[in-house]
Image (spheres, grey):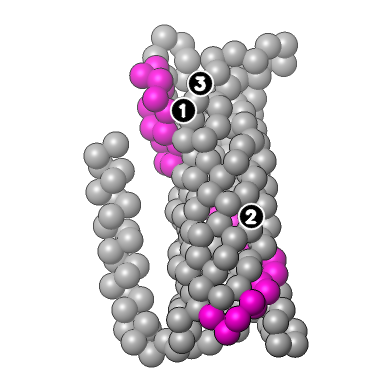
Amino acid sequence: MKNLRISIVTLIALCLAFAAPLRLKAQHLEFGPFAGYETGGKVYTNLGYLRVSDGLNFGGTVSFGLDEDAQFEFSYNHMNGTLSLDDGEHIKNSTPINVDYYMFGLVGAQRLGDRFLPFYGGALGWVHYGTPDEKYGNESLFAINVSGGMKFLITENIGIKIQARLLMPLYASGYYFAGTGGTGYGVTSTCVMVQGDFTGGLYFIID
């Protein structure tokens, strides 16, 4: 867990250092919290389907660029759920799990009239699975997402943002979700877990 925290801090520091020269020229900065609903997902293992439950989620975004048409964006998303194994007959080895996505990507938008801004985007990053159960370890996986939605300006600097995303962690062949006492699950081929994400919230503009 300590190494993971160091990696997260290091990656964020590198991204901020890389973005600093761009930010000096940027004329448009947005940030905002969001909350919503995240669907469950599953991936096939040697013992059956490993499932992550659905649940309420929350997070936030920070984005910047020369204008609102194209921006660099960092997003964080958290969900409390349940990890379990479905062997086709029973749901077993159920344990609470924290699911955290850290994503870096690009977002494009096109203004329609004075108030509406449809947008779309894509991002790369990672997802971290954390469990309080000592039988399991904490795991991190490479992830990608695609997104789309609508922004609605209330004033020149405050708006409402509605978004839908596909969150896709990549499980490589040979990946093993660590456990003790026969509770670990191995992935036998490279595959992607797909989760949906539907959120809304306010966002704030600094020009």
Question: On the image, numbered disc 1 is attached to which residue?
Answer: 177
Q: Position of residue 40 (x, y in %)?
A: 65, 36
The picture places residue 84, in percent across and down from the top left corner, at 58, 22
Q: Are marks 3 and 2 in contact (CB under 8 Å)?
A: no
Q: CA distance from mark 3 to mark 2?
A: 25 Å
The N terminus lies in quadrant: top left
Task: Confirm whether residue 170 shows in the render.
Answer: no
| Residue under the image location 64 percent in, 45 percent down | 37
Q: Position of residue 138 (x, y in %)?
A: 38, 32
Please tell me which residue is depicted at 52% across the width and 35% down the height of the picture.
80
How far is mark 2 from mark 1, CA to CA?
29 Å
Identified by mark 2, the residue type is Thr
Q: Where are the magenta residues, as a range?
A: 128-157
Disc with the residue nearer the chain's start (1 vs 3):
3
Per the image, label 3 sits on a secondary structure element best described as strand
* Disc 2 crowd, CA 10 A, few/some/many (<14, 14-19, 20+): many
At a point 65% along the width and 15% down the height, the residue shown is: 91
Left or right? Give the position of 108 relative to 61.
right
Q: Which residue is mark 3?
A: 95
Circle 1 or circle 3, nearest the eye: 3
Earlier along the polypeptide chain: callout 2 or callout 1?
1
As displayed, is residue 41 above or below residue 34? above
Q: Secondary structure at mark 1?
A: strand
Between 94 and 48, the one lying in front of the other is 94
Can I make out residue 66 in this image?
Answer: yes
Q: Amino acid at mark 1?
A: Phe
Query: What element does badge 2 sit on?
Result: strand
Mark nearer the N terminus (3 vs 2): 3
Any mark on residue 91, and which? none
Mark 1 nearby-residue class (10 Å; few <14, some 14–19, many ≥20): some
Residue under label 2, please give it: 199
* Mark toward the viewer: 3 or 2: 2
